[in-house]
Image (cartoon, rainbow, N blue to C red):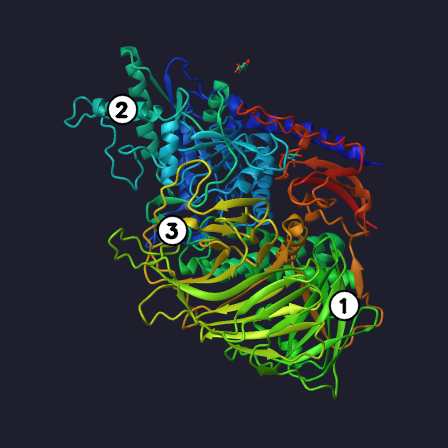
Amino acid sequence: MIRASFFFSNMAAGALQLAVALLSLFSAVLSFPLGPETKHTTTCGYESCHATKPNMLNVHLVPHTHDDVGWLKTVDQYFYGDRNDIQHAGVQYILDSVVDQLLKNPDRRFIYVETAFFYRWWKRQSSSAQQTVKQLVNEGRLEFVNGGWCMSDEATTHYSAVIDQMTIGLRFLNETFGACGRPRVAWHIDPFGHAREHASMFAQMGYDGFFFGRLDYQDRMHRMVQKEQELLWRASDSLTPPTADLFTGILPNGYNPPEGFCWDQSCDDPPIRDDPDLEDYNVDDVVMRFLTIANSQATVYKTNHIIMTMGSDFQYENANLWYKNLDKLIHYVNAQQANGSKVNVLYSTPSCYLQELHRANLTWALKTDDFFPYADSAHDFWTGYFTSRPALKRYERISNSNLQTCNQLEVLGGPASRQGPFGEGESQTMKKAMAVAQHHDAVSGTEKQHVANDYARRLANGWQRCQVLVSNSLAALSGSSAKRIYCDNLNISVCPLTESSKKFSVSVYNPLARPVTRPVRLPVNGTAYAVSDANGKAVDCQVSTREVRRNRGFAVNELVFQVQAPPLGYSTYSVSLRQAGPRPASAQPGAPTVIQNKFLRVTFDPDTGLLSSLSNLETKQSIKLTQNFYWYNASDGNNLESNQPSGAYIFRPNSSTPFVISRTAKTETIQVQFPHMVQEVRQWFAPWVSQVVRLHGDSRALELEWTVGPLPIDDGLGKEVITRLDTSIKTSEIFYTDSNGREVLQRKKDFRPTWNLMQSEPIAGNYYPINSRAFIKDDVDQLTVVTDRSQGGGSIHNGSLEIMLHRRLLYDDVRGVAEPLNETSNIFPEGLVVRGRLLLSLDPPSVAADAHRPLAQEVVMQPLLTFTNGDLSPNTRLEFSGLQAALPPAVHLLTLTQWDKDSVLLRLEHQFQSWESKVNSQPVTVNLQKLFSTLDVLGMSELNLSANQWKDEMMRFSWTSLPLTDGPLWLDPSTWEVTLRPMEIRTFLLRVSLR
Ligand SMILES: *[C@@H]1O[C@H](CO)[C@@H](O)[C@H](O)[C@H]1NC(C)=O
Ligand SMILES: *[C@@H]1O[C@H](CO)[C@@H](O)[C@H](O)[C@H]1NC(C)=O
Ligand SMILES: [Zn+2]
């Protein structure tokens, strides 16, 4: 084993690089004098903090800018300061100006957050400017906080994509600045509510603390009174404390400066006029106002330290305004100490403030739930964005799946995947597009329409480049360089190749670490086909008439067959047109009363055509289940109680009773030749709402494929469309949602775990984000719904679960985006049509997670189909798996991606919570050397979750709350066996070579 040398060579190289860095720093100091008072130090991090005064109230002024990675303008428009007619904002000027101003006074501090912008700026700087910036970073004068590519949304993101975007940003900072570039503090000052899973991830990324700005207004009032705006968040019920413990601070004024102290060019507050010879000398007034604010802020926090965020959206473009006044403020306020003032004000950063809180050695409140939903006043619940822009949300999710496939195939195909018969493939564009899409105005759906289009365009560009890589890799693995064709519009049954070809093959790549079986549905124009698998064996297939798709595509039929794909691998199926065969199955009017396979039985009400019951035939359990579609009439703002309309952010129905779209569904049923393959019932509720109820032969889940839109607005009413499942399950007002696709949280109607809620919006105030699944249960039955994208939902009535699918609104909701959420496009001039799937399963609660955890991962990381036309050359390898064996059911292979020439990044995850499953909530051990079929693992070392720190160097502040149990025991790294405990994600850098 050469592994040990991997470790040591790594550390030795680190030490060497440090020495080189110190040398180059020294020369930098000589050639770039940094101002008269410069101390030539290389102290960054906590050691670079300004001294504070123990017997005074210390006010930490944090100069900062909040730079959205796209919102009213695209990320590139923001960077350059383009389209200032939309919003005056130019990030390049901010960084230019701040660096100049920092050089003028070594006491000054600045924090920078969004690496997507910093990276754009950095690569356009001269090497001497880069040296100057390095010096500022090394002295702690410019400090990175958060440091991900963007500041992710917390409600609508999936953990997989969040970890990836943090990794990209933090890796750039580490590679550019080394240890001094590593952020100590997570900083989510703007996201609209806070997910527990985000806190858990931040803890595992090594952050010492976390600050944010927005929380429910009642929660804030309560915490101010209790002095609990700073707390310890225990963000996992499964990971051993303190693994997922994160110190969390709530900022005093969102992320804005105190009233009257905004000195940006975008503000109108009076500057400090300190010439006593001039008329409007105002120093006394400024000092007095400041002392009043500081002393009052101190009454709602626990220590003799308080923080003030001196900046806001896109501020500091002309940083001189801010710094000149801040210098004076500090000078004049502190001058009062000579007259007995007990207030000490200083330039600071969030980490310096955090260090003082840590030193205070207090006992902090403990929190174990999350910060959803967020309301900023009684009728203003930010629960609409859980669903806003459902097509973008789905595209983002599918892009994540495609990116993971692209990453895996880059590793498995080796160097040939980057340069091959199809040109130069690369995954960087897609990685960055996905990273940008995690921003809190991207996948959240709270951006302007042209910006949403820009995010989608970036994802499409990224995917095009990944396609080259995927084609190259599959060519290398299969030995066939036949041209690969992609059908990205299969979701609307469009694929020109399958619609016209007489003979083609389809390869199914499965990015999961265990085999999957799933049906493939292809649009075709023939009536009979023969399908064979990788071993040449005939596969049952069925042709049926296509459902109505409003004249999109040209196929008249659909070919369905079942495929199986091995773990981290592909299987290839051949399809050829036959001269004759059975007539395509056609739809017969009317619903059957029942469809069933060996696991599930589904009944329909003969009068209404609606679903009426669901039974699990294995466990012999059965529930009443009625499903229908409804719409809430969006508030238009003309209301006695409040003038708040529904909009991109806010959900505010005009009435708590939604309109039913139709009491009955017009239905038809597909007659099947192979009932063990698929049975389908098609339902129409309105010209703009239809659904296919599908039961696949070997599936334990019932599929509801909904199609909603264009939502009619000619009646002048905004609409928020839901589907509601009403069941006989006795839920006592409780339901469950996942947090960013990982741990599950309990939700109770009109209830918040840490304060007495005064409920003022009976529907919107009971909505929560659903990222991948939600469920309702009683002692006997659990109905789980797996979603294919993030959506909002609630359980308003006992036994009921509703999910919001689509929204179309006519008014802006006055939170800044200044556009009504009314999506139209060239293809959808009458309004956006959206299609998606819900997967329903019914199980006893004690085993439900065993079914829905893997099911949800299958939807998140779905197989990728690639096509080749005509015959394949005889030597083509038709099946391949990158693993020696499937991983155990509890283990999810979260990440496999090329890191540098010789090493790959691997994340293995235990995907069960500790209490969830008798069989699966046990620790599992995996041998890293026996993992891959085509890679030799030569060396390995463990990293933190975001891969910017070696695990054994990871040290975090410890905090006192309730008594803590012992920390987790990390396995001896001298073994290849790694053990994963419930909900644990472990990150490894593996040095590998292709066999
Ligand atoms: C923190 O406080 C505890 C008592 O609550 C004390 O035992 C401990 O020594 C203190 N630690 C420091 C570093 O002051
Ligand atoms: C961080 O970057 C330094 C070089 O700047 C490198 O030596 C070190 O290995 C990196 N750390 C990680 C965890 O990649
Ligand atoms: Zn923002």
Percent position of residue 977, x then y: 79, 38
Residue 148 or residue 603, whichever sits in front: 603
Q: Nearer the viewer, residue 925 or 757?
A: 757
Query: In the image, 499: left or right of 415?
Result: left
Q: What amino acid is at disc 1? A: Thr
Q: Is residue 238 visible?
A: yes
Give how far apart the Cα atoms at labels 3 and 2 are: 39 Å
Which residue is the site of mark 3?
Answer: 762
| Quarter of image, res 674 | bottom right
What is the secondary structure assignment of the residue under circle 1?
A: strand
Residues under numbered marks 2 and 1 in contact, where contact means CB atoms less than 8 Å apart: no
Task: Judge: label 1 CB < 8 Å from ligand 2.
Answer: no
As displayed, is residue 646 above or below residue 963? Answer: below
Query: Mark 1 highlights which residue?
Result: 572
Q: Which residue is mark 2?
A: 292
Above or below, comparing residue 602 to residue 224 in the picture: below
Q: Nearer the viewer, mark 3 or mark 2?
A: 3
Whether residue 456 sits left or right of residue 226 in the image: it is right
Instruction: Indicate which disc, 3 or 2, sits on the residue closer to the N terminus.
Output: 2
Does residue 897 appear to the left or right of 80 in the view shown? right
Seen as rendered, the residue at the extreme left is: 279
Q: Amino acid at mark 3?
A: Pro
Quarter occupied by residue 86: bottom left
